[in-house]
Image (spheres, rainbow, N blue to C red):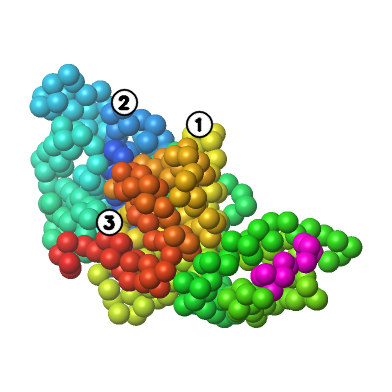
């Protein structure tokens, strides 16, 4: 039996059965989930011990997704679907249906119920608020842009910041997507690998010209009698000072070393990491440092869950991997990191377009709509940049843009309007 199924006892005092959140379902899943999970021991209504989701027929699927997320957090959750009339302004029938849901509560639950009016249609929201106002019960909504909980009625008046307790798994699941294996990586960043990204970024102008041959070399590497390598490095490359300086940066990680005219890698995973994983890790590290700095300075927004290598499966069964994903201020941010070459003469349906359409597809996840970006170590042709702009995908590519990656992130991550 869950703790919401019975009154609990503590020190001989019987605690009231609650709090119960009644939430209205729309596409804004986090507006329902984060308040229900909020660890606010000094506030009467948080976190929720039970949730009731009220939805119209069009949002029944979203309600099921949200219910599963809440159940995964051990919060008993029920769904009540209402029938909305043809005239959205005629709310009398909706008032009756919301009242019927309210009447299912026990006397103890009615003393600890609160309405989260953030979601739902306008008619459903008006109906639910009127029921709660009539019964002198508290109502709040989530100002998603400012990540604040605002009271519309009840004894509590003070607005407050909502702790971002939902993680990436919660956000994807509440929109019908699942994170599948291999599991996302929340890195414990190693100093050697951090230095690699910093040195590569500092020398991007020179190294971007020679990283292509290096990537090609690694893609041909294979196990030769216990030694993971490709053929000898071409004489022209061995004579290139920038290539040598770049390889030395990689050698300092201990993942690759020179052996005569060959580069020898510590296995296939090391070669994969040096073929592009290092850039993904660098982007992760810049975001993670920004998260730490903002936490120390009590910045108006705080970056929440952050992970790389996020493999997701859509309700249709199609799968994709996103290089870096993080949450901030009730919004999902998705980033693709590339060190490969973008051909200025490539056909519009080439490799670049595959990446753009993947981000465009993933950008519809969440509410508010997710923000997406491409970080490329090498320049991106203007026709690909133009298509990215049409899809509302931001691009950071090569040279000075990579050097100013943190500056871009500080502008890209949305700050509450009242703090702007």
Density class for disc 2 (Cα within 10 Å; few <14, some 14-19, many ≥20) is some
* Corner quadrant of residue 103: top left
Residue 45: numbered disc: 3
Q: Residue at label 1?
A: 316
Ranked by sequence position, the earlier of labels 2 and 3 is 3
Q: Are marks 1 and 3 in contact (CB under 8 Å)?
A: no
Magenta span: 228-238
- Which secondary structure, mark 3? loop
Q: Residue at x 63, y 62 (%)?
A: 213
C-alpha gap between disc 1 and disc 3:
37 Å
C-alpha gap between disc 2 and disc 3:
28 Å
Ranked by sequence position, the earlier of labels 1 and 3 is 3
Q: Nearer the viewer, mark 1 or mark 3?
A: 1
Residue 89 in magenta?
A: no
* Corner quadrant of residue 373: bottom left
Residue 137 pos. (x, y %): 16, 48
Q: Residue at label 2?
A: 57
Residue 74 pos. (x, y %): 47, 50
Q: Residue at x 19, y 51 (%)?
A: 140
Q: Is residue 231 above or below residue 383?
A: below
Residue 366 makes an appearance in the image: no
- Which secondary structure, mark 2? helix
Image check: 169 left or right of 29?
Answer: right
Q: Quadrant of the C terminus?
A: bottom left
In the depicted view, which residue is nearer to us: 124 or 314?
Answer: 314
Image check: 73 left or right of 22?
Answer: right
Q: Is residue 106 above or below residue 400?
A: above
Q: Nearer the viewer, mark 2 or mark 3?
A: 2
Residue furthest to the right in view is: 225
Ranked by sequence position, the earlier of labels 2 and 1 is 2
* Corner quadrant of residue 286: bottom left
In the depicted view, which residue is nearer to us: 35 or 338?
Answer: 338
């Amino acid at each position: 039996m869950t703790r919401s199924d019975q009154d609990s006892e503590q020190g001989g005092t019987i605690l009231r059965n609650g709090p119960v959140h009644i939430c209205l379902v729309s596409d804004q899943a986090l507006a329902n989930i984060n308040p229900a999970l909020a660890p606010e021991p000094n506030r009467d209504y948080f976190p929720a011990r039970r949730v009731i989701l009220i939805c119209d027929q069009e949002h029944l699927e979203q309600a099921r997704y949200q219910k599963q997320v809440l159940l995964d957090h051990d919060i008993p959750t029920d769904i009540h679907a209402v029938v909305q009339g043809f005239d959205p302004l005629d709310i009398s029938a909706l008032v009756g249906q919301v009242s019927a849901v309210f009447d299912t509560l026990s006397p103890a639950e009615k003393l600890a119920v609160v309405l989260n009016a953030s979601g739902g249609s306008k008619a459903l929201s008006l109906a639910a608020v009127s029921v709660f106002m009539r019964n002198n019960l508290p109502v709040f909504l989530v100002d998603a842009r400012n990540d604040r909980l605002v009271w519309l009625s009840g004894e509590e008046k003070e607005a407050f910041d909502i702790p971002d307790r939902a993680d990436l798994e919660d956000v994807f699941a509440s929109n019908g997507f699942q994170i599948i294996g291999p599991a996302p990586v929340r890195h414990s960043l190693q100093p050697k690998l951090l230095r690699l990204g910093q040195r590569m970024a500092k020398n991007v102008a020179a190294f971007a010209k020679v990283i292509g041959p290096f990537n090609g070399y690694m893609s041909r590497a294979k196990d030769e009698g216990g030694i993971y390598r490709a053929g000898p490095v071409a004489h022209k490359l061995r004579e290139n000072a920038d290539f040598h300086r770049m390889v030395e940066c990689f050698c300092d990680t201990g993942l690759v070393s020179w052996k005569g005219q060959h580069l020898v890698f510590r296995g296939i995973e090391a070669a994969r990491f040096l073929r592009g994983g290092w850039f993904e890790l660098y982007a992760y590290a810049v975001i993670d440092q920004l998260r730490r700095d903002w936490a120390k300075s009590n910045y108006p927004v705080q970056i929440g869950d952050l992970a790389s290598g996020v493999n997701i499966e859509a309700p249709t069964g199609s799968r994709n991997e996103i290089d870096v994903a993080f949450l901030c201020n009730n919004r999902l941010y998705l980033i693709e990191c590339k060190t490969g070459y973008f051909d200025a003469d490539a056909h519009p349906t080439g490799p670049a377009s595959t990446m753009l359409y993947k981000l465009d597809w993933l950008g519809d996840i969440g509410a508010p709509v997710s923000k997406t970006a491409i970080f490329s170590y090498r320049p991106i042709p203007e026709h690909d940049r133009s298509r990215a702009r049409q899809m509302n995908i931001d691009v950071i590519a090569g040279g000075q843009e990579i050097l100013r990656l943190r500056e871009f992130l500080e502008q890209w991550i949305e700050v509450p309007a009242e703090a702007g």
